[in-house]
Amino acid sequence: MPGYEEGPPPGLFDEDEAPSNVVPMRAGPTKEDPFRGLVHLPAIALFGRERILKLAATPVEYLWKDIAVAGTVILIAGPPSEGKTTLLFLILAVRLSLGDPIKLLERELKPANPAQFIVLIEGEHSESSTSRKLQKSLTIMGVDDAGLRRIIVVARKAVLVGSREWLDVELMIGAGLVSDIGIDTLARVAPAEANDETQQVAIFNQLAKAIERAPDGLDRPTVWAIAHTRKNGRDGKDAGLGEVSGSVQRVGQSDTVLIVRGEKVDGQTVSTTVKFEKLREDPDDYPKPFTYSIVKGPDGQPCIAGVTKRDERPLEDRALDLMRSEARTKTWLGKQLNRSNSDIEVVITNLFDARAITSVKVNVGGRERSAFIAKPQEHRTGASDDTWYQTSIGRASDENE
């Protein structure tokens, strides 16, 4: 009966006179006090004008400026072999730093608490491959390799979310010892039917429960998880939230979603673009897509370099611009355009067919090489190519190599 575990209906006894087996009915919620008589909701609800205004005025404490806050799940999604793991390892490298925040994708990322560990569950790469990638990532971000003392790697050991090994990780979280968890990939570490909403919800519930095990007073661990985009999607070039495998729940329950796509030359990824598709907070300075490459610095060591805005013009137009003032070799054009030899061959053929270029001989490093230069507009009708290009031949130098 409402209000009683057992015994007579309400109103039969005053509270002071009620038998010991009777629980008097509690006073219920009212317009003046909506929490009156409630036990569970007041413990978790935000209520009250003053509290809401105070929280609204409190600045967001970002882990990664404008991108991520601590204690959340960040999904890094994209096609296979286009830069997802590289980005994850760069993030973890910064988190292993003992110094000041380091800019990654033009936004400051804070190092983790030096008293805590990072757990990396790597289902895609072996221990040796993971070790090399970690070392290279530290070099790229300028982080001392002493940080490797604070990372626990579980590589290709078939450790699954919810397994005994995973429960050990949760015990470490409960002891306040974990700052970050890296997962590569969700498909291996948390296998489930991508389109089964129940299974996807269960995975993210497990991740959330693990995060909540952290003791009060410490930042909760941040989960960085890699996921693939759909195999039958738009090849990643314009992939958005709808292209993430298991997108309905993976995207819905992730706090932040980064979409990664790479540009490849001869099967190798030469640059990576990161789109910030979903952010938990709504920053005033919302990050624009950022493109970067891993290149050799002046000291010969790998470093990260931003790439200028992608030129979407046809390759022939871009190549022609590079040949307007100087004769250029195929090798030089390939490097500048990040294209394979076969791609450059097609471009040169198409430009010859359009009577837009002509071939010349240039001296490169003491050797005579074939090069190509654009014709002036008035000479693109098949007229004789006499001396219009001669002044430019002398400017071709070792940069063509």
Image: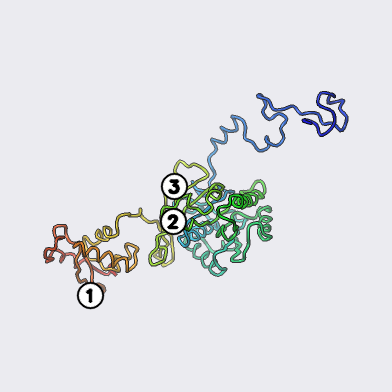
191 on left or right of 229? right
Above/below status of 394 relative to 53: below
Q: Quadrant of the C terminus?
A: bottom left
> Which percent across, then down, holds residue 131?
55, 67
Q: Are marks 1 and 2 in contact (CB under 8 Å)?
A: no
Upstream in the sequence, badge 1 or badge 2?
2
Q: Residue at x 58, y 56 (%)?
A: 193
Q: Quadrant of the N terminus?
A: top right
Upstream in the sequence, badge 1 or badge 3?
3
Q: In terms of secondary structure, where does tag 2 sit?
A: loop
Q: Mark 3 — residue?
A: 287
Q: CA distance from mark 2 to mark 3?
A: 19 Å
Three-letter code, disc 3? Pro
Residue 153 found in image quarter = bottom right
Q: In terms of secondary structure, where does tag 1 sit?
A: strand
Label placed on residue 368: 1
Q: In terms of secondary structure, where does tag 3 sit?
A: loop
Q: Note whether residue 391 is visible.
A: yes
Q: Mark 2 — residue?
A: 236
Three-letter code, disc 2? Gly
Q: CA distance from mark 1 to mark 3?
A: 48 Å
The count of marks equals 3
